[in-house]
Amino acid sequence: MKETKICVIGLGYVGLPLARLFSTKYKTVGFDMNQKRCDALMAGHDATLEVADDILQDAINNHGFICTSDIEKIRDCNFYVVAVPTPVDADNNPDLTPLVGASTTVGKVISKGDVVVYESTVYPGVTEDECIPVVEKVSGLKMNVDFYGGYSPERINPGDKQHTVEHIKKVTSGSTPEIGKYINEVYSSVITAGTHLAPTIKVAEAAKVIENSQRDINIAFVNELSKIFNRMGIDTLDVLEAAGTKWNFLPFRPGLVGGHCIGVDPYYLAQCAQRHGYNPEIILAGRRMNDGMGEYVATETIKLMLKKGIQVLNSEIIILGFTFKENCPDVRNTKVIDIYKALKEYNLNITVYDPWANPAIVEHEYGIKVVNELPTQKFDAAIAAVAHKKFEGLDVPALLKENHVIFDVKCTLDRSIVDGRL
């Protein structure tokens, strides 16, 4: 087989770390439709902070890694990896538009003998039934005759500097047994944690979509427990710590479930099930529970304010954190916005403080303002929504008026200062 030349399409949280890693072993080109993103990366800085500047610059300067939006610069590649987002629409239906666009791009440049591997999270069948036909139509080539396909689900954990792409075991698959082995060899050459070659593309797709659906359901269970124990006057964390003394108890914690994976993937699995004539009950029940937690936090905060005699109308509330998880700037599908929207219905004034979030991106995506500097005014209530390390040691009561409420979503604050928590 000819020398492997890799093109990674989509240079976001998933694509860039993978492309950078591939560049240490292979000639690698990163392709993204966003020219400003490519320019910033070629200048040596990743705004997502997934790849440190020195590592990115090493890839560019010492390994020949380039980022481009010019389709002509990826035409000589022969191993295409698609790593674009797979969101849901306003009705929580899978939106395959980015995948179709990326498949069209691949179709314009793919040649005989080439391979295209998809990493985007999908339900079983999307790669072979939705994506590959687009490649075939645009290119005029046929899979397993002229070119080959594969699927290797991404397992990136944004903001996690320990479990980086090379340190997470990778599932691989191919459209033929021989191509599966080749794809597996390419990935295993850079993934130090090892690989697992699945027997089919559909098995690999299914494995990915149930990983996050499983987490979603387990978190939904403890979120429901939190609501129950709150009514009973029992601290949920105390209960979980006691139950956790059993060796096989799963240590899930209540919280907001957003982001581009756990909060989205179950809808892909549910849609797939419905297409096959099965109406999933547990999966969608878990989604409903988790999607309602932002409003629950807001309602509980308002109740606590009323119990303390704090006038809600025109009161001042600060939300600490806006990103979908701690220690990263990713605001995609953040459920903190649900807290914000629910609070707004009470006609109060809300300040959102997050040193990680990009205010311009937040305003563009959600139409609200986020500040990166801690305000000096005093507030009636604080909601600790995201457990950023930058919040450690923050004197939350000092931000508040004498009569105040603190609601701790992540259970990270000293319980002696907290009025309510999940």
Image: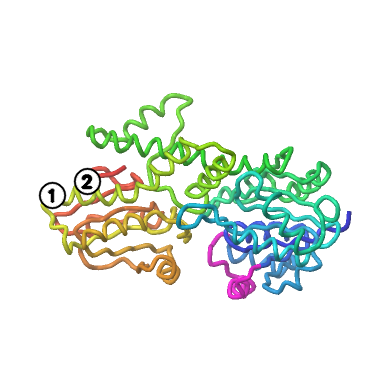
| Alpha carbon separation for disc pair 2 and 1 | 10 Å
Horizontal relation, residue 48 to residue 111: left or right: left
Q: Are marks 2 and 1 in contact (CB under 8 Å)?
A: yes
Mark number, residue 356: none
Please name the residue that numbered disc 2 is placed on.
419
Please name the residue that numbered disc 1 is placed on.
308
The x and y percentages for residue 162 are 56, 49
Residue at x 45% of width, y 69% of height = 361
Quadrant holding the C terminus = top left
Badge 2 crowding class, 10 Å Cα cut-off, few under 14, some 14 to 19, many 20 or more, is: some
Magenta segment boundaries in residue numbering = 32-50
The x and y percentages for residue 226 are 32, 37
The amino acid marked with disc number 2 is Asp
> Who is closer to the viewer here, 64 or 264?
264
Q: Magenta span has 40?
A: yes
**At numbered mark 2, what does the secondary structure look like: helix, strand or loop?**
loop
Which residue lies most toward the front here?
277
Asked if 340 appears above or below 271 in the picture, the reply is below
Q: Magenta span has 213?
A: no
